[in-house]
Image (cartoon, rainbow, N blue to C red):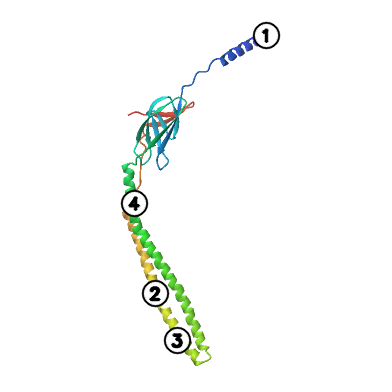
Amino acid sequence: MRSFILLIAVLAVSSVYSQSDTLDPVDKPAMGDVHFLVDVDNGYFEIVIDDTMYLKLYKCQLPPGHHTAKIWSPGYVTNLVEFDVYKDSLTRKYVKMVISNERQQFESDYKEYRMKFHKSLTVPLSLTLASALTSGAFMINSYTTRKKVFQDIDLYFSAPSYQEAVLHKANMEEHNAKYNRQRIIFYSTLGLTAAALGTTIYTYRQFKKNNSEPEFYAPSPFKDKFSWYATPLSCGIKWRFG
């Protein structure tokens, strides 16, 4: 008897579920897709739609109708645009952004900073490097000439005749004079290199002491309007007015 009653109950529940499955599902609200084509050079932007939806993506879904959006990107003026969304269709909205005065001033200040940096370090360092290379070249040449002097000396003492001895002596005197000139130039350029290096270090220290690299700080105008919240069952964004 109990088994029969249990069977009837199971069949009744199954019948209820089967009937509920045949009911028409609740219609979902109509939506449309929106793609924002934001013209910025840094690839980053934030969008607030109808003062309620906060996005960092270029696309979203919205109910059909007229909407407004505020678009911001670091270094650009916040742009307010209007657009219409249609059911089951894609709306593309091109947004032309204008560079802000703050960014223009930063770029001007940074260009001036780089020019000062170039004068204080790049130019003196280039002169130091050129002087060092010149000094090294004369050092190598003087070493080669010195070897020739010693070769002339050996040839002079081993000359089989007086005429050859006179010839080797003349070559020795010529190479020795050339070697002395190269030594003078070498030590002169070496001194110039040391002076240029000292000047480079001094000007760079003075530059760092008297100049600081410009920084561009552009906080989001939306950062104080939104805050994240999370619960065990959901999460989202809170909009703060005022």
Query: Whole-Å distance between the Cαs marked 2 and 1?
Result: 119 Å
Task: Give residue 170's mark.
Answer: 3
Residue 208 can be seen in this image: no
Task: Give residue 4's mark.
Answer: 1
Marked residue nearer the N-terminal end (2 or 4) = 4
Q: Is residue 228 above or below residue 152?
A: above
* Nearer to me, 40 or 208: 40
Compared across the picture, whether 1 is left or right of 210 comes to: right
Residue type (three-letter) at the residue carrying disc 4: Lys
Residue at the disc numbered 2: 185
Compared across the picture, whether 61 is left or right of 111 comes to: right
Name the secondary structure under disc 3.
helix
Q: Is residue 134 above or below residue 149?
A: above
Query: Whole-Å distance between the Cαs marked 4 and 1?
Result: 91 Å
Marked residue nearer the N-terminal end (3 or 4) = 4
Query: Whole-Å distance between the Cαs marked 3 and 4?
Result: 61 Å
Picture residue at 34% right of the left edge, 44% below the top:
103
Q: Residues within 10 Å of mark 2 (few under 14, many from 20)?
A: some
Viewer-nearest of discs 2 and 1: 2
Residue type (three-letter) at the residue carrying disc 2: Ile
Farthest residue, direction top: 1
Residue at the disc numbered 4: 111
Name the secondary structure under disc 1.
helix
The quarter of the rendered structure image containing the C terminus is top left
The quarter of the rendered structure image containing the N terminus is top right
